[in-house]
Image: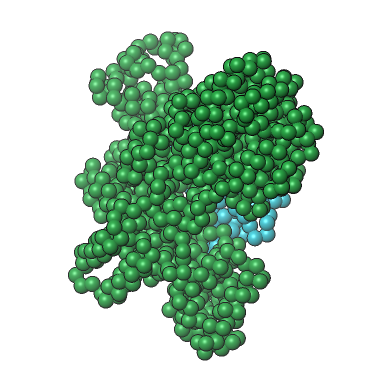
Chain colours: A cyan, B green
Amino acid sequence: MKDTRLEKILLERMFMEVYCHFHPLSALRRGLFRKGAMPASMLSSLPSGSRVVVTGLVIFFHTPPTRSGKRIIFATLEDETGLFDSVIMPNVQERWGKVIYTSEILTIEGRLLKQGKNGKSLSIKAIRVIPGLSGSIKEVSYALRQPISENP
Amino acid sequence: MSKQNFVNLDVTSAYSFLYGTFSPGALVKRARGLGQEAVALTDIWNTWGVARFYRCCLKEGMQPIVGARIELEGAGWVVLLAKDLSDYSNICRIISAGLAGQKNTKRPPSPFPLKKVEGLGKGIVCLCGCHGSLLRKQASKGRMDACKRRILLLERIFGEGNLYISLQQNVPSDRDANLLFMEISRKLGLGAVALNHTAYLERGDFQVHKILVEVQRRHHHRDIRPLPNDSFFLLSKEQMSRKMEIQEAIPASGEIARMCSGFSFPKGRLHPPRFRKKEEAERILARRALKCLARKGTLTPFSYITALDRELETVRKKGLCDFFLLVNELCLFARKRGIRHSIRGSAAGSLLVHLLHGGPDPIKHGLLFERFINDGRNDLPDIDIDFDSERRDEVTGWLIKRFSPAAATYGTGYSGERMQAALVSTVHTMRVRGAVRLAARAMGYPLKEIDRLSRCLPWSLRGIPLLEAIERLPELKDSPLRHEEALLCVAASMEGLPFQASVHLGGVILVPDHINNWSPVFPSRKGFPVAQLDKDDVDILGLLKLDLLGLRMHTAIKKAMEVLTQEGVSIDMDHLPLDDKRTFDLLCSGNTLGVFQIESSGQRNLVGRLQPRCFDDIVIEISLFRPGPVKSDMVNRFIKRRDGAEETDILHECLSDILSPTCGVIVFQEQVLRIVHRFAGFSYSDADAFRRAMTKDRSKGEMGRLKAAFMERAKRMGRDRALSELVFERIAAFAAYGFCKAHAVSFSHITWQSAWLKAHQPIAFYIGLLNAGHVGSYPPFVILNEARRAGIKTLPPHVNVSGWEYRRKGHGIRVPLHVIRGIGIEGARKIVSERQKGGRFRSWEDFFSRIRLSRAARYGIIFSGALSGLPVDTSPYSSFHERYAA
């Protein structure tokens, strides 16, 4: 393994409960940029409705009861620049449910939703999950050296 | 009950954990379906299901027969049944004594000495010779004399006419045993009763019983066998007639049921133990309250005096002075020990509570005492108190000791010593993922296969049956579990069954007499007596429960304050300015990870949209983020109106001051009370009854009745009919979703304290959060990542500088040793104490020679970098591994 940052991250993940040096995604950022995934901090500068690709460490899922009775997953993800939330509707769950629930890192493509007077409240409505860039840290780091098919 | 009816008297439900397969409710329904008028519940060494069973029986019009199945020394398993409440108390005492001597609470108690039952057994109906008992084993071997001797001994203990010999017909050897028992019964003039030990309701559930017992064997390592065949189900009279050869023993069950018909729990809610005379309590309470009011400020406004007078009068009328003084004593104890605490719930709306126990000023915040106590409520009010979770046990211990001085030696609790307080227990039920994994393990699946099968399976399915979820949930679409039909069926039957009991997080019950009159008790790990009642049972029995809850945010704030104190910074957290700009800026940014109540993704989103600019905005924010308001679109309506995108509709000028703070949206329950009071002239107690009725039963009939009452009163007030209808509609739409403002204000204070700390003292705030255990929804690594993003250095653990908690190091946080996998808190303490004793570790060899660690911990220490900078005595990594990590 040549990437020392990645090596450190993998060691910390294996032997510690916290990341002491840097966020795992910071070690993957260059590759993620190449694949079009942007950091969460950039989202605030984009207009609402923009199509974005983001990658985050899965923190937790929340499926509260909804008015329509549909099961909507609210996923809280984190990259090196901050936390962000994603709304995963039933049609996306239907296709990528297994990837969503078994990935440590999740890459989603979706539309940016900005709410509130100053647009301070951000979330991403997922259109699709990119399975090639989702999985464990090791899997994603490996995938970043591979071309990702357009239609996974 | 007809004379010839058959009653099942030996019934073990799912509360005989991992043995019975049905709930008490299902039992009552099934017995009713079989045309029976009575049924017994006799769980193994416990009465956990009794309160529910009692309620279900009353609902279905059945006679409840309560008791327990216990094992006696020399006689084996017997069924004890209560004829009345005093017998029930004695059964509770016997169970308590049996459980008190138990070393391992996970295992059933060893057989209880007969000697200890003497004095308690008189009057209890005892059915001996049950399935699995020593007596039955001896009888099947034809040992008449031995059986006779023991039966005579039992008769002496339980009294003449109370001992019955049970005849059962489940295995071939039962025939010989039954004949011998019949002979003994005729010779000694004792009754014989036909029984069928029941562990499942229908024959087909035998498989589930077998799996449950296998779970006991594999999960709890218990030496237990399942029942020998599928005949141990609930029988009808006809089935019993066909099964039992000795027909004359069948009617005896009906006779026993009639003997037990005197049992019932006392109705109505009871009062807590009294420890003063009524007049004395009233005088002390009034004096204390006035003293606190006088201490409050320079000149007491008249509104405070009238409010206090009104509250004291209500409390006096309801005879609650003792209860208030008890809570006051609790809070004084906590204050004296420096234990952070706060009042939650509707109690925060009382000036009396504010003066005696602290919390928000109800008059300043416009809270209503009547939401807490009013003349129309007959139940005892709840005063819920949150304590620093690390130190809550000190308060619980004080309360238990105060009302149960015998708690320390309650193994002999039935000797008559006072025991009026015990902890409430909680019964864990099996959730879907746990049920699948346990069933798979019991069915012999290898662990790897179990992991594969349960991958993607959520912990809970929110009410969707497992078999349906497998078809519906997309993440289970390709699950290998779909092909495991047998496993799925068993797991579906196990889901929702009680799995094990433990101690409730903060509930303490106080009874007016002796705790064993209500329930058996067992020792908690910390040595407190725990009643076999969960929180719902306490309500069913009408007992007083105090909720001494642990709030980790209090712990986090305390830990943060400790960091600041070490640096010489002193902050009065209870009197922070409520208009601090930096704190509001933080809230508006939505960067509220770690801030009490507003850190979840939804809350962060809402707080970003709301842009709070005053303390009341935080109160509204906390109240709005509930499933009801979110579902009913109250949130969007409020935000639109606040932002001027929608017009605020106040309905009538007399409601202006009530509705304008929330832009015409009814957010708080207190608003409903005020509207109904002012618009329709209801008294506050009637208004509260109106609100509660509207929340509980929203059927068309009930709503129509409430509307008629509202319209009638509004007419008397001279209100316009169309307007009255509009006001009622508005109340009806929102009343069910309204939130208690007193509770929201109380929580908002803690939100403000945590947000203030995050805004002004971020390092101390993060250290507090990290050292307080699991606070809120985020794991420690997310909090540490957030601290790093805030520009705070995060320093890795090191054996020579890290402690066993997170510490401040300049403008950074030093990570403790326990985050290294395999070390844990104990390991970290060991390393720190060795360092303090023997000095810093000089080399790797020095460290490993002084600290003995497991192989995994040794790897953790090496690869986490906790030894970095120390000289390695043997140079190459690999050879080092051979020496230390191998």
Note whether residue B176 is visible. Answer: yes
Of B33 and B442, nearer the camera is B33
Q: Is residue B192 left or right of residue B67?
A: right
Picture quadrant of residue A142: top right
State the image quarter where residue B184 is shown.
top right
Q: Residue B487 lies in what quarter of the image?
A: top right
Check the image and report above or below for A59 versus B448: below
> Residue B416: percent from the left, percent from the top?
37, 38
Q: Residue at x 32, y 40 (%)?
A: B405
Residue occupying the point 76% across, 33% down: B247
- In the displayed structure, B687 sits above or below B60; it is below
User: How many numbered tags mark residues here?
Assistant: 0
Q: Nearer the viewer, residue B113 or B640?
A: B113
- Above or below, comparing residue B285 to residue B451 in the picture: below
| Residue B75, image x, y percentages | 56, 23
Q: Residue at x 39, y 53 (%)?
A: B272
Q: Where's residue B496, x and y in %?
A: 63, 41
User: Residue B283: x percent and y percent?
Assistant: 25, 63
Q: Is residue B331 left or right of residue B230?
A: left
Which residue occupies 60% across, 47% down? B261
Q: Is residue B830 above or below residue B538?
A: above
Residue nearest the viewer, comparing B749 with B884: B749
| Residue found at the far left of this picture | B298
Judge whether residue A129 can be spotted in this image.
Answer: no
